[in-house]
Image (cartoon, helix red, strand yellow):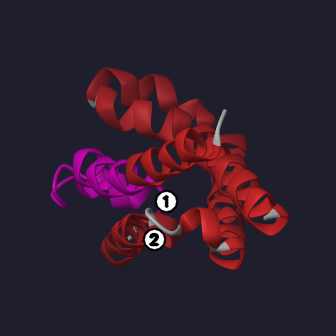
Amino acid sequence: MNSTANNRFIFLGFIAAGFTNIFGMLAASEFFTNTAFHKLSPEVFSDFGTFMVMVWGLAYLAVARQAHQLPAICFVFAFEKAIYVYTWVVWISSKSDMLPILREETPLLALFYSGYGLIDLAYALFFAWVGIRALQK
């Protein structure tokens, strides 16, 4: 992949990450109205925590054009995503038995809690990859 195509891919990846955070939180929390969303993991997805995930999304959007030149921020983003992967692993390890009940009551919420860690893992690896590429230039 040439440099221009690579930079475009990186740009689009950051845009996708930003929109995933912003619209993912709005959808999963049903625009902050689904109290079950917050109660399932209050230490991570309180109203404040949910809002801050959206702020991270804005940060991804803000650096999308320059991300290929900013290794430090890419590594910060990768670390931030790794923390969310960890919180998801802890949640899945202790509360995955709730997923069948959630699927019946609120399928979107069950989908979110089933997979947000995998999505964050993909973005963590993407951000780390961009950071490594930026260091190599």
First of labels 1, 2 by sequence position: 1
Residue 80 in the image: state x and y as whole percent: 64, 69
How many other residues sit within 10 Å of disc 1, few (<14), some (14-19) or many (≥20)?
Answer: some
Between 92 and 23, the one lying in front of the other is 23
**Does the magenta run of residues contain 29?**
yes
Residue beneath disc 1? 41
Classify the position of the C terminus by image quarter: bottom right
On the rendered structure, is 29 left or right of 91?
Answer: left
Residue 16 in the image: state x and y as whole percent: 40, 46
Residue beneath disc 2? 63
On the rendered structure, is 116 left or right of 81?
Answer: left
Classify the position of the N terminus by image quarter: top right
| Residue located 80% across and 60% down the image | 132
**Which amino acid, by three-letter code, is at mark 1?**
Ser
Write the start and end of the magenta stretch as one range.
17-42
How many other residues sit within 10 Å of disc 2, few (<14), some (14-19) or many (≥20)?
Answer: some
Between 79 and 45, the one lying in front of the other is 79
C-alpha distance separating marks 1 and 2: 29 Å
Vertically, is 29 above or below 119?
below
Residue 112 in the image: state x and y as whole percent: 42, 38
**Which amino acid, by three-letter code, is at mark 2?**
Val
Between tags 1 and 2, which lies in front?
Answer: 2
Magenta span main SS = helix
Q: Circle 1 — which element?
A: loop
How many numbered marks appear? 2
